[in-house]
Amino acid sequence: MNRRVVITGLGAITPLGNSVDALWEGLKAGKSGIGPLEKLEKSQFSSQVAGEIKNFDPTDFIDKKDARKMALFTQYALAGAVQAMRQASLDPDDLDPQRCGVILGNGIGGFEVIEESHRILFDKGPSRVPPMTIPKLISNEGAGQVAIHFGFHGPSYILTTACASATDAIGNAFRAIKYGQADLVVSGGMEGCITGLGIAGFSALKALSTNFNDRPEKASRPFDKDRDGFVIAEGSGILLLEELGHAKKRGAHILAELVGYGATCDAYHLTAPDPDGAGASRAMKDALTEARMKPEEIDYINAHGTSTPTNDPIETKAIKTAFGEHAYRLKVSSTKSMTGHMIGAGGGVEAIVGVMAIQDGFIPPTINLDEPDESCDLDYVPHRGLKAKVKAVMSNSLGFGGHNAVIIVKEYQA
């Protein structure tokens, strides 16, 4: 069995806005969603910038009583899923629940729940720890709550591969449909990690940007020689995947087709990528092989592009290994320059970017790329995006632990 998989709905909660339209308009304008850290007393942290979610009201999407039972990452996931279902014009009552699933990615879980319950434990004792502590904080509740909300009884689970989580989730959802385990899957990723523990933990690893605290919008600068770390961000990026016949039968508007997925592991280091980029390169090649595409057929790569000293030149090397001379004809950009690094949500948002690039004929820029690192010598679409015919997009996600995940979306053709 080898069924075609299409994308019929999108939903997003991001630092650029709480809808796909807001996200896309911000990216097209080269707007930064990064600002000063406001959720916490920033003076205690070495990194004082973040891609925070603004003006988010979960009751715009879900019942207030239900929202209280969810950690922030789950609220973001369900808000994105509701948006995607609405765009796809789907009523759960019209679907076979046994053939519908939820496969999502999450990197960290409910950090804010852990921190609050830990404070209560030490301040008031174990008997005062809230009973919903564990159900709210564990990552799988993101998928569980979405499945409960829509009444979907098919495969439902979370993948946690750090910053590759959402892309791995989309890849697994793709294969679940491709090989007949489901007809429709809500997929993508979510994260809610802008907390004291989240920022302190990443700061201890020297992973976050600290040199641009006075200029937050300049802090995320992938491929630039002055980059000094990533900018932590959060939110969700959710896609509705359907088997082609299922979508056509109900007259769905098809946004794009998902055609390839590659997943590898560097098996090199817990937090650093393999300097040769061999694992990332192989994931790109594997995605091309599954898609039955030649490197020359890819128009645009949405790079992992974290703005860290190690990622950007190694990912560049991996792209050149996978694409050969075509690497220099590709357009490559990192939208993390505008959203920040949304960890487990990143691959979901960036998959949406790929779909929108195809739909709108536009390649978003890498902002803040004032002087490229000498090891970063591809066309990263600096400062301003450009109108272009985009037929096929590759999206890369590379995570701690050496996890590499790559998907390919292309223009749908009947």
Image (tube, rainbow, N blue to C red):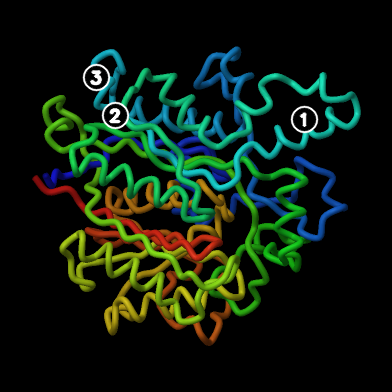
Q: Is residue 313 above or below residue 171?
A: below
SS of the residue under disc 3: loop
Quadrant of residue 367 in the image?
bottom right
Residue at 25% x, 49% y: name it: 258
Q: What's the CA distance linking mark 2 and mark 1? A: 38 Å
Tag 2: amino acid: Ala
Q: What's the CA distance linking mark 3 and mark 2? A: 13 Å
Tag 1: amino acid: Ser
Which is more foreground, mark 1 or mark 3? 1
List the residue tagged with mark 3: 95
Q: Position of residue 146 (x, y in %)?
A: 44, 26
Q: Is residue 95 above or below residue 386?
A: above
Which is more foreground, mark 3 or mark 2? 3
Q: What's the CA distance linking mark 1 and mark 3? A: 39 Å
- In this view of the protein, which residue sits in the foreground, 391 or 362? 391
Q: Spot the residue most to the left.
A: 414
Which label belongs to residue 198?
Answer: none
Q: Indicate left or right for 56 with 334 as reference.
A: right
List the residue tagged with mark 2: 88
**In the rendered structure, are the residues bearing label 1 and label 3 in contact, judged by CB atoms less than 8 Å apart?**
no
Residue at 44% x, 19% y: name it: 149
Quick one: label 3 or label 2, which is nearer the N terminus? 2
Q: Spot the residue most to the right.
A: 123
Indicate the quadrant containing the N terminus: top left, top right, bottom left or bottom right: top left
Residue at 56% x, 29% y: name it: 75
List the residue tagged with mark 1: 117
